[in-house]
Image (cartoon, rainbow, N blue to C red):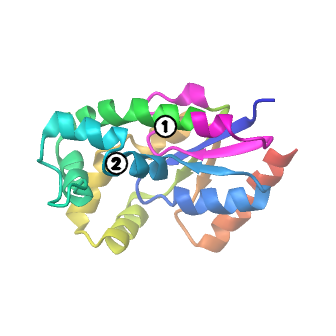
């Protein structure tokens, strides 16, 4: 029997990973993190690593052969053409990993965290979508604190993605994670109860 899949998305700094982990724990459901899958694809010799090496040569690689993730990430947020090129290389590989991972699950409910669910055109991979929303100011502060970047760099990262308002308008479920985590927990538990029925 195919599992029912909830896609969890949002924007950088919205807190989608925290929401996803708590929801998975509450629902006793497996959580597939596409970012983690992509990290594996970029390890030395893996398909994503090979694709980047063929496309860019040594430009985004460290002396030991590994991907220079910091340099690549910065370039992606600065240059829309590079972002599209990298997405074009990695998204098809990640989509195959997603399908394989979901196919291995025997649970009734499976949660999948997909940061670029709408941008990548993956809406058809999930049954319904949860958008984790947060106000721009809250997101900026979280990105600055987490990544050690300036406000300008944080704002640039946010601007590189589809607006959360647009994502929220397309979703079946929205959790506003702008305020205290205790408030978000109440909303997550309520959603977990709704999904369990």
Give the x, y percent position of residue 168: 54, 41
Give me the residue at 26% from left, 33% from top.
84
At a point 35% along the width and 64% down the height, the residue shown is 140
* Outermost residue, right side: 197
14 falls in the magenta region: no
Q: Is residue 119 left or right of residue 170?
A: left
Label 2 packing within 10 angstroms: few (<14), some (14-19), many (20+):
many
Question: Relative to the observer, which residue lies in front, 4 or 170?
Answer: 4
**Residue drawn at (29%, 44%) of the image:** 49
Residue highlighted by disc 1: 117
Q: Earlier in the sequence, mark 2 or mark 1?
A: 2
Q: CA distance from mark 2 to mark 1?
A: 19 Å
Q: Is residue 4 visible?
A: yes
- Is residue 104 part of the magenta span, yes or no? yes
Asked where in the image residue 93 lies, by quadrant, the reply is top left
Q: Pick the residue in front: 56 or 46.
A: 46
Please report the bounds of the magenta region as a residue range: 100-125
Q: Which mark is residue 42?
A: 2
| Element at label 1 | loop
- Mark 1, Cα crowd under 10 Å, few <14 / some 14-19 / many 20+, is many
Image quadrant where one finds the C terminus: top right
> At 49% from the left edge and 57% from the top edge, which residue is drawn?
134
Q: Is residue 141 above or below residue 132?
A: below
């Amino acid at each position: 029997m195919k599992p029912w899949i909830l896609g969890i998305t949002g924007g950088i700094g919205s807190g989608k990973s925290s929401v996803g982990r708590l929801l998975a724990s509450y629902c006793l459901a497996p959580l597939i993190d596409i970012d983690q899958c992509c990290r594996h694809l970029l390890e030395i010799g893996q398909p994503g690593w090979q694709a980047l090496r063929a496309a860019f040569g040594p430009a985004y690689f460290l002396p030991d052969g590994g991907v220079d993730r910091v340099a690549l990430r910065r370039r992606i947020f600065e240059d829309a053409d590079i972002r599209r090129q990298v997405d074009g290389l990695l998204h098809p590989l990640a989509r195959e990993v997603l399908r394989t991972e979901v196919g291995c699950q025997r649970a009734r409910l499976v949660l999948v965290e997909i940061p670029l669910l709408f941008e990548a055109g993956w809406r058809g991979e999930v049954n319904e979508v949860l958008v984790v929303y947060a106000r721009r100011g809250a997101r900026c502060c979280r990105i600055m604190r987490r990544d050690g970047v300036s406000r300008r760099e944080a704002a640039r990262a946010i601007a590189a993605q589809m607006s959360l308002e647009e994502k929220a308008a397309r979703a079946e479920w929205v959790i506003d994670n702008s305020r205290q985590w205790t408030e978000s927990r109440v909303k997550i538990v309520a959603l977990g109860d709704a999904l369990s029925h």
